[in-house]
Amino acid sequence: MAMAEPRDNQQPDSVFTRPPRGRRAQPALSRERIVAGTIALLDRDGAPALTMRKVAAELGVHATSLYWYVDRREDLVDLALDAVLAEAAAGLPGPDEPWESAVKTTARRFYTALTDRAWAAEFAGVRPLLGPNALALSRRIIAALADSGGGDEDRAVAIRALANQILGAATTTVAMRAGAAAARGGTDDARAAAVSASDALAVENAYFDQVIDLLLAGIRARRAT
Amino acid sequence: MAMAEPRDNQQPDSVFTRPPRGRRAQPALSRERIVAGTIALLDRDGAPALTMRKVAAELGVHATSLYWYVDRREDLVDLALDAVLAEAAAGLPGPDEPWESAVKTTARRFYTALTDRAWAAEFAGVRPLLGPNALALSRRIIAALADSGGGDEDRAVAIRALANQILGAATTTVAMRAGAAAARGGTDDARAAAVSASDALAVENAYFDQVIDLLLAGIRARRAT
DNA sequence: ACCTGAACACCGTTCAAGT
DNA sequence: ACCTGAACACCGTTCAAGT
């Protein structure tokens, strides 16, 4: 209430201790900082660690402060998911790319972004992917299919088939990884684990590509009849 | 410690109040009762209502009592999911069914079981489906593909493609339903809602069948080359 | 063997209050 | 405008105790 109260303990008032003019105009928190903290937490401790209190602790702030920037916990999930898709959405094939390879590389980028961090695939199965980056990826596939020939109905079916495939593949891939890790227990040395993990990744990716190829074969066959 | 203590308040000891011989041999709870209560709760109040305390309340028992029968909350999810797949797994196509129609009807039964109750699809995206009924459904599809011709590798790819498709389709279907319900708000009369819901269901099912047909077309095309 | 009851260490979210 | 702090109504799970 009294003016000119000491603003903190011990610190004398000087240019160095005094906050820069208009510091309050740059608040401690922001959506970007919150999303960055959320992702750091998820990368380190996994999906179950995503609680308002832990995100707040990551940012050195109280849990209730987050509610100034987001309405609910789910918002954190949606924002983190779309942030992780940003990289995938940044390097999409150009409009002159042949439709089949455009579908393949876009689908693969989408799938890879979701499986690179286990938590992303886990949340993708629970929250609809409606962020700008998810939409950009989806639209690139839709645009590619527009060049595929065939009727509107066929294209709508193909779009769903591809979307289901990407989500289903990402979900089952991380579930299988978790199962394999649990089955292994702790009984293998780190080097062997690293080698077999990179082998397993190559196998997973090969499977994903072949599954997409299978769908493309179906689309071509349909268009031919 | 003392023998012949009064076993309850007020009630005089008689044949009618005395529990039948060996009653303690038939305990109040059982896995089946717990699963039935869990499903009743989920059907009524949806996936977020699945808490140990609410399941216990459904059965007139304390939350901690459930731990005699299951190890953790996830067990309840796994048991409820597989119970819901029992019906689908009961009426599988016989071994003489042509492989394509066997795949189609089995996939459809699987998908329908998951989408009939929203919570089933929601949990299926989060928990791997490893119960006996899920395995029976999966194995029927694997058996059908064994008759499809083609190499081992092609068949393995086809199995994954179908599994991803079923899971992905179920997940996105219930997500779209939830989104549509939210968009509608409360602003339509019950009759119109019922009609459009049954229309929407028919459209969903048609899409699912066409998506499976697309995959089958891909499998046939692959085998031909 | 089966169930209760107390307890622990958490949750998400609200709201009034401070600055 | 932005953050704190207290509070509410929950959670899953453990463990000792009762019968």
Image (tube, coloured by chain):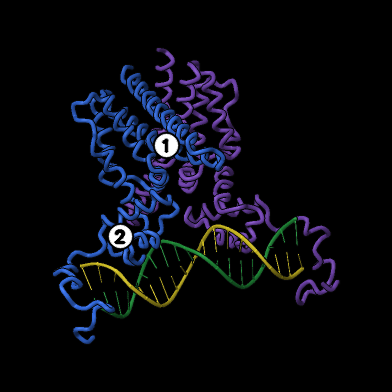
Chain colours: A blue, B purple, C green, D yellow
Residue B25 in picture, x, y percent from top left: 78, 56
Eyeballing the image, is B14 above or below A130? below
* Residue A11 percent coordinates (x, y): 24, 77
**Could you tell which of marks 2 and 1 lies nearer the N-terminus?**
2
- The alpha-carbon separation of the residues under discs 2 and 1 comes to 29 Å
Judged from the image, the secondary structure of the residue bearing numbered disc 1 is: helix
Q: Which of the two residues, B167 or A48, is positioned nearer the viewer here?
A: A48
Q: Looking at the figure, which quarter contains the N terminus of chain A?
A: bottom left
Q: State the quadrant of the C terminus of chain A.
A: top left
Q: Chain of mark 1?
A: A
| Circles 2 and 1 on the same chain | yes
Instruction: Name the residue beneath numbered marker 2.
Output: A70
Query: What residue is shown at x 33% (from left), y 29% (from top)?
Result: A158
Q: Position of residue A101 (x, y in %)?
A: 28, 25
Outermost residue on the left side: it is A21
Identify the residue position indicated by label 1 in the image. Answer: A168
Viewer-nearest residue: B102 or A7: A7
A13 horizontally vs B30: left or right: left
Query: In screen coordinates, is A196 left or right of A1?
Result: right
Q: Compare residues A41 and C14 and report the one nearer the observer.
A: A41
Say which element carries label 2.
Answer: loop
Say which amino acid is labelled 1.
Gly
The subunit letter for the residue under badge 2 reads A
Crowding at dot 1, Cα within 10 Å, few <14 / some 14-19 / many 20+, comes out as: many
As drawn, the residue found furthest toward the bottom would be: A2
Viewer-proximal residue among A195 and A1: A195
